[in-house]
Image (cartoon, rainbow, N blue to C red):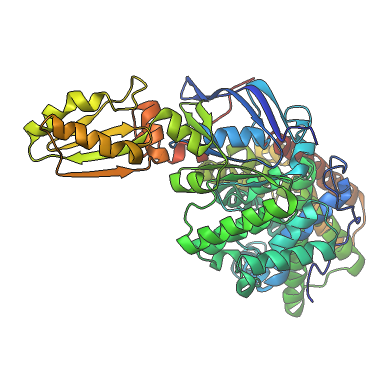
Amino acid sequence: MSTASTDAPAQRAETESEGPTYPNGFLGDVWLVFVRELRPMLRDPASIVFGLLQPLVFVAMFMPLLSGFSDGELGLHWFVPGVLVMVSLFATATTGSNLQFDMHTGAHERTLVVPLRRAPLLIGRALKEMTPLTIQACVLVAITVPFGFRPDPLGAILGLVILAVFGVGFGALSYSLALAVRSQDWMFWMVQQAVLFPLMILSGMLLPLDRGPEWMRWLASVNPLGYVVKAERALFNGVFDVTLAQGAAAAVGVALVGLFVGTGAMRRA
Amino acid sequence: MNVKAIDAAGLTKTFASRGTQVRAVRGLDLQVHPGELVAFLGPNGAGKSTSLRLLTTLLKPSEGVATVSGYDIRTDPAAVRGRIGYIGQLNSAGHNQRVRDEVVMQGRFYGLPRARAAQRAEALLETLELGRVSKRMVSSLSGGQRRRLDIAMGLVHAPPLLFLDEPSTGLDPQSRANLWRHILKLRDEFETTVFMTTHYLDEADEFAERVLVMDHGRVIADDTPAGLKSTLIGDRVTLEFGSAQEATNALPRLRGYASGNGREGPTRRDTRVELPVPDAARRLPELILELARDGAAPWSAETRRPTLDDVFFGLTGRTLRESGTVGDTGETAEPREEAE
């Protein structure tokens, strides 16, 4: 039977009445939430591909213009790593709306009344975020290779790891926002849009910032996403320098802040 | 076991709503013993759901204390959660999940080993007639099927104490009967304590051993359904007279028969008079003979057992239906909690 194919945390006694406060361990809780969140995607893998539509449009229609303006200097090697960051950004920024949907239907309330710790409710969800975005990033790379994109293999792997870590953090922030605004959908989207686009433009993801005004470059210098973009560009082109450390630090920082804020929000839920 | 299933004292919940304080629950005192089946009855906005959400640790009380299954809802909410089942008003399952996956996962959340959770899920889906849709996506289910799935998810760990918030709302009569069969079976097998809210009077009447009537955040009555009906009001007698004048003439005599706890006497509407009479079937012949001696014999007479609706009317002067002043959203929406 195809039951519960992947989950395997600690086995527990069935006696509820005298059992411990939490029937599963902390990591067991994280694992169960992770598996539950991942399952719809495993059952319906085609859904991941839809998320690729937007980044592909950018590669197909934005990059040729950029390439033309820069006299061919900014080609796939420059643009694709940026689009990969865009994939992780957009995939995880919207994920809070899934939680809002669960708040509307009652599925979220259900998880609050079962004996799961609060923190794993968020951590499991956030960890799941890295799966679709990693798959999407791999597919995007595979699509662009025939058109001349030549990623460095080791760099690409490191780059994907950094992206995944960043995705966990940004996903956690998206969930935090959903928990903070509760059932007010419009508020979620308003804040999300207000944050997402400045963050994206100020990361140099789509256009280089070195010709921008001073204030923009200053803002970019404090945008962690910019460091992730720089690291991705270096890594996918086989350059291993200080940008790797900066990008990794930025991604880990976002993940830590996201998980901290998110678990706090979930505890208050 | 001597531990009370529920032991609450002075439980109060205050919400801040548009600058005013709304006291949804005011000083709830409640003892429920293991194995009891208790129904919470009252109109929308009476505080039933909020009480349930306090007892199931979904809300923190503003004042008061309570232990559920022997654990403090304030200091040890996690222990409470592991020992209760809760079927809320909303749907429990994720809409993009598969039916069976959700039930199995629910069992895992409660610490059941995988094989045991799968076995329980199988059995429950079969009993609740969801076997055929077990591989379907939750969003594709009908309303009744979703409700039954909620119930399966709430029962998967065979909780010793089960909270149900209007469990049969939206179910067709057959599913309702089915649900009740299942709950009663659970009680027989595991001596499960059941605490439910409902505004179906017949449901509380038929199944509950004890009914708490709630209004404006307070419990205003606590008794067996039979006890409530006999002490608060008698059976209902309706008499039809030949004319309104005859009906009016009969009123003084009828006043002596009305069970009247001071609250209710006979009420006349046109040619009909209705009055509460204790033990009406036995007293009706005598009543009619006396009326005949007065020259005011009725054309027809009818007795009816009182319903809980009559009880609620007797207690509050309002019917359950017209009392839904706060509206359905009053309890399900999440009002902002007061700053503590």
- Determine the residue positioned at 58% across, 38% down: A181
Residue B329 located left or right of residue B7: left
Examine the rendered structure and indicate whether residue B53 appears above or below residue A72: above
**Residue A163 x/y as whole percent:** 79, 56
- Determine the residue positioned at 48% across, 52% down: B169
Nearest the viewer among A96 and A232 is: A96
What count of labels does the image hold?
Answer: 0
**Residue B3 x/y as whole percent:** 78, 32
Q: Residue furthest bottom?
A: A146
**Residue A98 x/y as whole percent:** 62, 53
Q: Image quadrant of residue B97? A: bottom right
**Residue B230 x/y as whole percent:** 44, 33
Q: Quadrant of the C terminus of chain B?
A: top right
- Does residue A207 appear anywhere in the picture? no
Q: Image quadrant of residue B193? A: top right
- Does residue B105 appear anywhere in the picture? yes
Q: Image quadrant of residue A116? A: top right
- Determine the residue positioned at 57% across, 53% down: B91
- Determine the residue positioned at 70% across, 51% down: A204
Q: Quadrant of the N terminus of chain B?
A: top right
Nearest the viewer among A13 and A115 is: A13
Examine the rendered structure and indicate whether residue A169 appears above or below residue B22: below
Nearest the viewer among A179 and B223 is: B223
